[in-house]
Every structure is written in structure tokens, then in C-alpha cells.
């Protein structure tokens, strides 16, 4: 019996829970034609909420309609990789393109004076090169029914130069009436940082989808489907599994996967018992810590981790003034980190002056690993970081 759950980052799950709205909006945009607002889309949300899966899912929809889809990750050199893919070759370097005109409009922001000539040229060449590469590829296609979709994952401000270039290129292509679409994805704070750049006003108009948890009844339906064949579970067990997920997509895969596995380990064959479910949920929580909480915390500044640690003392909601006191800081100081953590869906405001954990099981993780996290911070302080 094959386990139908796939707790692997970026893997399209066998049963995709929720997300019908965004898929139908995208389908509509494909049908709606050139210039449809849904052809420029931003997907944000916490780690493990299903951003990459959404990019892949929408990419599949586009391919089914005869579109060409290019998936890229927004790290250094992605524009070059896009151009290479479009040109169908690995060695089409930007510098090899011969471009007499450099009259690209749209500001580049302030160009630092200490930039070498080469770098300046590159900045101006990139959008034009990409625009031409997309145009040339489209010329080979039947543009009345086919187009090019670019998906860009893990958007972060470190690639701002290239994101600017992509923005300018897309703006021109859309203005020229070409059949193109662009979908970006990233953590909310990273996307906000990128969008605050004045040179990409065009991208700021993109439709924004913030992915959150999916409704419990949808999770239950998915579990009923997955545990309704070779391996079954009683309704109360399914409800227990559903509750343990908190509707958080990565946890759906982890809970399902480990309940299934534990039923096998415990030799229960066709059934997932309450015992299997309970043990599976425990395993799922540990994995969630390793695969989601730890990497998320690693990306945060030390004071943001301290804020979370100060919150984890409470069993329920936390008072923001009290959290700042525990940190030995002013409320204003605490507020900076409160805002950052809310933006990243790790915590949420629940009432005036009150915050609560939003990411499932993060409190438990912090309580278990608090000493370690504190030690790491002390070490980095000693090192003067
Ligand atoms: N709508 C969904 N329903 C069920 N599982 C999902 C859904 N979206 C994502 N997942 C699962 O959650 C995990 C994380 O998804 P991923 O797209 O990598 O998240 P992100 O890119 O936001 O970090 C994967 O195992 C994936 O299969
Ligand atoms: Mg991802």
C-alpha cells in the first residue's frame, strides 16, 4: 500500500486541499486574454503554506492550455537563466546579445557612482534582453492561443536588480499586447520589501494572494478520501487527525503521512487506530519543528526570536506590554518585532495589545528548544554580531 501523503517541500500533494479560488481566478485570467489583471500575480504566505505547490499547480493549468511555462527561483542570475531557457540554449549569455538601442524607460532608481561601466551596461541590457527573448519565443508560437508564463519562487530583496529588470521587461511585453503572465511567490516580509522598491511600480499592481490555513471541513474531506480505500480510519480518528493539522498545509501532509506510517509500523494493516493517530501526530509535530520552525527561526533576527521566547511563557494570548517587559525593552522596541512577526504569519494580533501564536505548534517548539535558542543568541552576542 502506497502512502498517499507527501510531506516534501514543493511537492504537489496527491489531494490538494482548498485553494479553489486562486485556481479559478487564474483560469479566468488565462481565458480573459492579454492585459487581464490576473496574469500578474503575487503569492505570499508563511513557510509550508503551499506557495511553491501553487506555482506548480498554476503552471500545470497553463501548460494544459498550450502555454509554455518557465519556473525560476529568484536567486542570483535568474534573468540569465530565463533568457537561456527561452533561447533554448545554455550558453546564451547576455553579453553575447548585440543591442544598439538602450532606450529603456522606467527608472533604475539611484545608480551608485562607484559602479563600474560593465555593471551599468548590464542593468540596462537585462530588461531589453529578456523582453526580446520572450518576444522571439512567442514569435515561434501561435500567440492566438499560446503564451508564456514565468513563475518566480522565493522572491527576496537580495535579487532586486534582477527583479527590476523583470518588471520592466514584463511591463513592455504587456504594453505590446503579448500573451504573457507572471506569478511571483515569497514570504510576506520579503515580498513587501521587494514591493516597496519605487522602480517596480508596475509589479505593485499585481493581484495579491495571501495563502493561509485551509478550512477544517476541507481537511476532513481530504482525510476521508485518503483513508477510505485500502487503509481506513473511523470518523473520530479522522476528526482527531484533522484537528491536529490546524488547517496548515504542511501539517496535513505530515499528519497524514505519519498516521499512515504508524499504522504500518504497529502492524495494523487496513486500519489507522486511535493509537496510530496519536503516535503519528507526535511524529508529525517533531518533523514540523525540524522542517518548518527551525528554518523559519533561523531567518529571524535575534530580537524577534527573543520576542517569541517571551511570548512562549504564556499558555494562551500574550500581552504586548508584558512581552516587552520580559525582554527588558520598551514597548516601541517590542513593537518593531511584533510587526515583523505578524507580517510573517508567525503570530497574530487577537485584541488590542494582545498577540497569539499563529503558526501551529510554534509555542511548543520554542518551549522545547528555548534553552538552545537562547544559547545560540548569547554566543552570537559574544561574537559581536
Ligand atoms: N493545498 C494543499 N493541500 C494539501 N497539502 C498541501 C497544500 N499546499 C501545500 N501542501 C503541502 O505542504 C507542503 C509544503 O508546501 P510548499 O508549496 O513547499 O510550501 P511553501 O512553498 O509555501 O513553503 C508540501 O508537502 C505540500 O505537498
Ligand atoms: Mg516554497
Image (cartoon, rainbow, N blue to C red):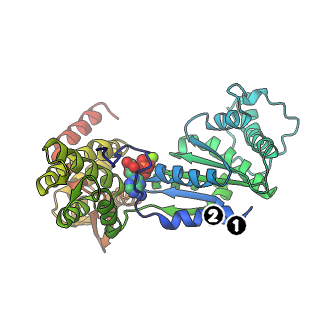
Binning the other alpha carbons within 10 Å of mark 2 as few (below 14), some (14 to 19) or many (20 upward) gives many
Query: Split into 4 quadrants, where in the image is the N terminus?
Result: top left
Earlier along the polypeptide chain: callout 1 or callout 2? 1
At x 64%, y 34%, the residue is: 81
Label 1 environment density (alpha carbons within 10 Å; few <14, some 14–19, many ≥20) = few
Residue 253 coordinates in the image, percent (x, y): 32, 51
In the rendering, which numbered label is found on residue 245? none
Among the 4 quarters of the image, the one containing residue 336: bottom left
Task: Give residue 193's position: percent from left, percent from top.
Answer: 52, 52
Label 1 with label 2: CB-CB less than 8 Å: yes
> Residue under circle 2?
38
Q: Is residue 188 above or below residue 321?
A: above
Q: Residue at x 64, y 41 (%)?
A: 162
Q: Is residue 49 visible?
A: no
Q: Foreground: 238 or 245?
A: 238
Which one is in front in this view, the residue at disc 1 or the one at disc 2? 1
Answer left or right for 24 relative to 116.
left
Residue pointed to by mark 1: 32
Instruction: Determine whether the beta carbon of the residue marked 1 sits less than 8 angstroms from the nearest atom of ligand 1.
Output: no
The residue positioned farthest toward the right in the image shown? 100
- Residue at (68%, 50%) from the top-left corner? 67
- Identify the secondary structure beneath mark 2: helix
Q: Nearer the viewer, residue 153 or 382?
A: 153
Which residue reaches farthest bottom?
Answer: 352
194 or 215: which is nearer to us?
Answer: 215
Report whether 378 appears left or right of 42: left
Q: Secondary structure at mark 1?
A: helix
Figure quadrant of the C terminus = top left
Residue 277 spot, x, y in % from top left: 17, 54
Residue 96 appears in the figure:
yes
Q: Residue at x 44, y 49 (%)?
A: 12
Amino acid at each position: 500500500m502506497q502512502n498517499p501523503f507527501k510531506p516534501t517541500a514543493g511537492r504537489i500533494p496527491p489531494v490538494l486541499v482548498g485553494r479553489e479560488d486562486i485556481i479559478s481566478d487564474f483560469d479566468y485570467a488565462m481565458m480573459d486574454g492579454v492585459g487581464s489583471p490576473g496574469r500578474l500575480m503575487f503569492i505570499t504566505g508563511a513557510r509550508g503554506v503551499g506557495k511553491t505547490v501553487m506555482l506548480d499547480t498554476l503552471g500545470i493549468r497553463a501548460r494544459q492550455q498550450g502555454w509554455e511555462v518557465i519556473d525560476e527561483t529568484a536567486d542570483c542570475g535568474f534573468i540569465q537563466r530565463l533568457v537561456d531557457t527561452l533561447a533554448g540554449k545554455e550558453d546564451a549569455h547576455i553579453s553575447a546579445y548585440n543591442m544598439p538601442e538602450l532606450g529603456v524607460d522606467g527608472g533604475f532608481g539611484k545608480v551608485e557612482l562607484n559602479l563600474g561601466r560593465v555593471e551599468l551596461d548590464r542593468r540596462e541590457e537585462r530588461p531589453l534582453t529578456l523582453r526580446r527573448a520572450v518576444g522571439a519565443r512567442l514569435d515561434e508560437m501561435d500567440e492566438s492561443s499560446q503564451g508564456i508564463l514565468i513563475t518566480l519562487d522565493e522572491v527576496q530583496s537580495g535579487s532586486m536588480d534582477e527583479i527590476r529588470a523583470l518588471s520592466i521587461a514584463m511591463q513592455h511585453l504587456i504594453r505590446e499586447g503579448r500573451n504573457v503572465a507572471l506569478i511571483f511567490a515569497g514570504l510576506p516580509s520579503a515580498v513587501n520589501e521587494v514591493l516597496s522598491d519605487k522602480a517596480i511600480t508596475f509589479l505593485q499592481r499585481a493581484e495579491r494572494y495571501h495563502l493561509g490555513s485551509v478550512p477544517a471541513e476541507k481537511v476532513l474531506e481530504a482525510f476521508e478520501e485518503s483513508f477510505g480505500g485500502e487503509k481506513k480510519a473511523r470518523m473520530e480518528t479522522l476528526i482527531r487527525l484533522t484537528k491536529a493539522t490546524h488547517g496548515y498545509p504542511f501539517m496535513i501532509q505530515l499528519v497524514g503521512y505519519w498516521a499512515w506510517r504508524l499504522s504500518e509500523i504497529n502492524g495494523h494493516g487496513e486500519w489507522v487506530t486511535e493509537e496510530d493517530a496519536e503516535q503519528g501526530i507526535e511524529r508529525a509535530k517533531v518533523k514540523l519543528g525540524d522542517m518548518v520552525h527551525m528554518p523559519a527561526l533561523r531567518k529571524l533576527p535575534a530580537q524577534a526570536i527573543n520576542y517569541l521566547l517571551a511570548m512562549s511563557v504564556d499558555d494562551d494570548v500574550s500581552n504586548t506590554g508584558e512581552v516587552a517587559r520580559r525582554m527588558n525593552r520598551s514597548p516601541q522596541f517590542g513593537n518593531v518585532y511584533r510587526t515583523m512577526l505578524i507580517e510573517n504569519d508567525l503570530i497574530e494580533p487577537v485584541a488590542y495589545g494582545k498577540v497569539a501564536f499563529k503558526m501551529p505548534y510554534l509555542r511548543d517548539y520554542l518551549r522545547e528548544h528555548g534553552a538552545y535558542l537562547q544559547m545560540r543568541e548569547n554566543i552570537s552576542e559574544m561574537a559581536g554580531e
